Amino acid sequence: MRLQSSPPAQHGGGARLPIDLSASLNPLGPSPAALEAARRADLGRYPDPSAAPLARAAAARHGLPADTIVPVPGASWGLWLCLVAHGAPGRCCLALGPCFGEYRRNAEIAGFAYEETSSELEVALLAKPDLVVLGNPSNPGGGAIPGTRLRAVCEAHPGTLFVVDEAFAAFAPPDTSLIEGAVPPANVIVVRSLTKELGLPGLRMGYLVAAPGLASELRGILPAWPFSAPALAAAVIGCADLDHIRSGAETGRRHVQLMTTTLTRAGAEVCPSSANYLLCRAPALLEKLTDRGIEGRDCASFGLPGWVRLAAPAPLDLPAVLEAIGG
């Protein structure tokens, strides 16, 4: 199969304003332990060619066998790998929208016929797609499907491959993820992002989780040295820095709730969120925030003109953000 060229999707995170709410990261900033590990990495030696230390660290974190883990340099790279590995002309990829722009782009690169739907997952599956990709929590909406419900749905449709994007699952309620102490069903690949959890977007870090056979197939497609030495060192140490991840999640949920209350009082329509960001309809908000030195994420590229996604701000930035959105 020949891969198809596709234009880049639009993303947040490139802000130059003092406060950046366009990218949803750990509001407490970088994990000190992971940051120090990256700084101490030996750049005079090759890193492990398969990033096996991260597979062991992620397995220990989730209580899973190491052969279920496939290290990848970031969640977006992992999504690309999943779709390219299973795409072919004539196959259908269904996504629950609105959603991350890389879903469409990766599906098109892989040769899928891509369709986006706003239907409930169970209704969408009546079309019997070859592959379903969904965010849990969703992006940009922040809604989450309980893990027990999602697992049951996946098991009831063994002919469909599910790629579950859990890039923000560490910030969601504890019952969201499919991989806490249990291997995903045989027809599921879970995508995880350490970049966001550890607050280190400059280091691309993530992993896939799947049943051993499926994980082995994906691992066999990877090129050697998927991680640089600093990224691998930070990822390994970061998997054990659960205090920083959990504290960031608690802070994020608290700040999102405060922003939700403030925006609602100001007359904005705010979607319920289970993540470290929120989606709101407030057409004049972006301009107002820009005037205050705050960058938000315009959701027109998600097909939502007039809607804005705002990440949970850092504690020191919270007062300024609440003041700006409350007018």
Image (cartoon, helix red, strand yellow):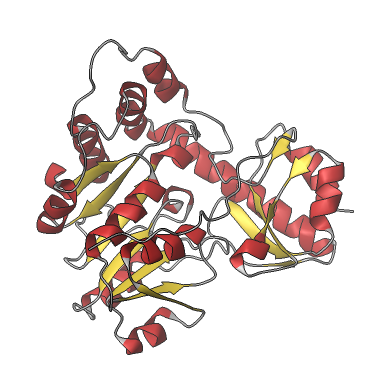
Which residue occupies 81% across, 64% down? 283
Q: Is residue 263 left or right of residue 39?
A: right
Quadrant location of the N terminus in the rendered image: bottom left
Residue 150, by quadrant, is bottom left
Residue at the farthest left position: 213
| Number of numbered discs visible in the structure rendering | 0
Q: Which residue is more in the foreground, 259 or 48? A: 48
* Residue 15 percent across, percent down from the top left: 68, 39
Q: Can residue 136 be spotted in the picture?
A: no
At x 18% / y 34%, what residue is drawn?
50
Residue 299 percent location from the top left of the image: 66, 61
Would you place residue 39 above or below residue 260 in this image? Answer: above
- Horizontal side of 245 relative to 131 (left or right) equals right
Tell me: residue 74, above or below residue 233: below
At horizontal 62% and vertical 62% (from top left) the residue drawn is 301
Report if residue 4 is visible in the image.
yes
Q: Give the vertical position of 126 relative to 14 (above or below).
A: below
Say which of 232 and 264 sits in front. 232
Left or right relative to 20: residue 56: left
Residue 197 placement: quadrant? top left
In the image as oriented, which residue stretches furthest toward the right?
A: 327
Where is residue 148 drawn, in percent x and y?
31, 69
Find residue 265 and report its horizontal and vertical position in percent: 83, 62
Q: Is residue 209 above or below residue 25?
A: below
Of residues 320 and 113, the one drawn nearer to the viewer in this rendering: 113
